[in-house]
Structure formats: structure tokens, C-alpha cells
Amino acid sequence: MRWLILDARGERVGDFAVAQDMAQPAYAGCTQVEVEDDDPRLAPPPPPPPKPSPLDWFMRLSPATQAALDTAARTDTAVSLALRYAGGVVAIDVTDPRTIQNVNLLRSKGLLTEGEVATLLAP
């Protein structure tokens, strides 16, 4: 048997081998239920999709598109900043609003096709 802590929406917050003191502030609004060890709610959540490195992300584009972006970045500050943002992180989070905004900026400047936008924003 395990003790499952559920938030107000019924989503798992944690699980323990022994019952917890629900008076703790960390558990405000939560409930505690006893479940069998094989309860599916005890399964770990699926891992998040991998995030590509800036190089892997950039390599999704054709050499011609990469060259066009590089050329545009030399004269267009907005393009330069968008590419610096991408190069300045450890991994590209394609769900990050800043990533989406920068990719759409490059599209609005005519540097990316709709297909390339979809490729860059794919997990």
C-alpha cells in the first residue's frame, strides 16, 4: 500500500510509503488517499520530449537557409538578436514563447518557409 497526495484537481502531487501529516502548509488544498502498489496513478510521468541543442536545431535547416539567416543577421538587428537567443541557450525549448516569437519573426522577414517554421518548432 502507498499513500497518494492529490491536488484540488485530482492530479498527483506525490506518493509516500506512510501517511503524511496533511496539516503541513505544503499540502493545503490536497487530499491523501491510500492506494494499492499497482495503482496506475503511481506510474512515473512520461519524460519530457528531448530539447535539441542550438546546433542540432539550426541543422534542421538547409545550408541555403542557414546562409540566408547568417547574411540577414549582418544587417538586421532583429534577426541577429533572434539568432543570438537561439545560440545562447543550452537547449532549444520549442514550446517557449520566445522561441516561437523568434521563429515567427524570421518567417515574417521572409527568411523561413511555413515548412521550415514547422520543422523548427517540432519537438
Image: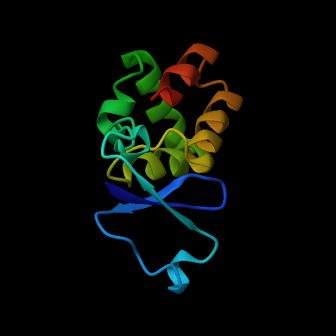
Q: Position of residue 70 (x, y in %)?
A: 44, 34
Which of these two is toward me, 95 or 49? 49
Which of these two is toward me, 112 or 33? 33
From this view, report whether residue 55 is shown above or below residue 63: below
Q: Quadrant of the C terminus?
A: top left
Q: Position of residue 102 (x, y in %)?
A: 60, 42
Which residue in the rendered view is the most extreme toward the bottom?
24
Which of these two is toward me, 47 or 41? 41
Residue in the image at 66% along x and 38% along y: 105
From this view, report whether residue 83 is shown above or below residue 20: above
Which of these two is toward me, 92 or 72? 92
Residue in the image at 49% along x and 31% along y: 69
Q: Position of residue 38 (x, y in %)?
A: 32, 39
Judged left or right of residue 17, residue 41 is right
Q: Quadrant of residue 47?
A: top left
Judged left or right of residue 104, residue 90 is left
Q: Quadrant of the N terminus?
A: bottom left
Q: Position of residue 27 (x, y in %)?
A: 53, 76
Q: How many marks?
A: 0
From this view, report whether residue 56 is shown above or below residue 43: above
Residue in the image at 61% along x and 53% along y: 10
Name the colouring of the figure: rainbow
Judged left or right of residue 18, residue 92 is right
Residue in the image at 45% along x and 51% along y: 84
